[in-house]
Image: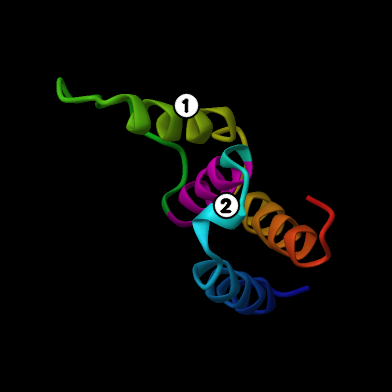
Amino acid sequence: MSEKDLDERFDKAFEIASKMAPSSLAQDVQLRLYAYYKQATFGTIENNFSQSFDLRNAFKTNAWIQVSHLSIEEAKELYIETVNAILNNEI
């Protein structure tokens, strides 16, 4: 599969996920999607934490750190798989 195909599938999955109501997803699923998205679009997180670090951002940052070992392509694939699992009521 080409990089273009992966990007198209990722963009479609993001479009679908963007239309989902956050309240319809468990918080761990929301964090997983967030982490995969950040890793897929920005790569590995840099450790530049600010003093105004609140609890919500701490959870998001922690989720991203947990997937920082993934390549951008792997993160895109896992994001797509997670969205598809949600759509198929597997999560």
Q: Which residues are magenta?
A: 29-41
User: What residue is at 57 percent from the left and 28 percent from the top?
Assistant: 66
Q: Position of residue 41 (x, y in %)?
A: 46, 57
CB contact under 8 Å: marks 1 and 2: no
| Disc 1: which residue | 62
User: Is residue 39 inside the magenta stretch?
Assistant: yes
Q: 18 above or below 23?
A: below
Secondary structure beneath label 1 = helix
Q: Which quarter of the image is occupied by the N terminus?
A: bottom right
Near-viewer residue (4 or 38): 38
Give neighbour class at mark 2: few <14, some 14-19, many 20+ (Cα, 10 Å).
some
Please name whichever residue, 3 or 7, is drawn nearer the observer in this view of the structure. 7
Please tell me which residue is depicted at 34% across the width and 33% down the height of the picture: 57
Is 90 located above or below residue 14 in the figure?
Answer: above
Image depth: mark 1 or mark 2 in front: 1
The amino acid type of the residue labelled 1 equals Asn
Q: Is residue 35 left or right of residue 5?
A: left
Q: Residue at x 40, y 35 (%)?
A: 45
Label 2 sits on residue: 72
Is 34 above or below relative to 89? Answer: above
Query: In this image, 70 relative to 2: left or right?
Result: left
Q: Residue furthest front?
A: 23
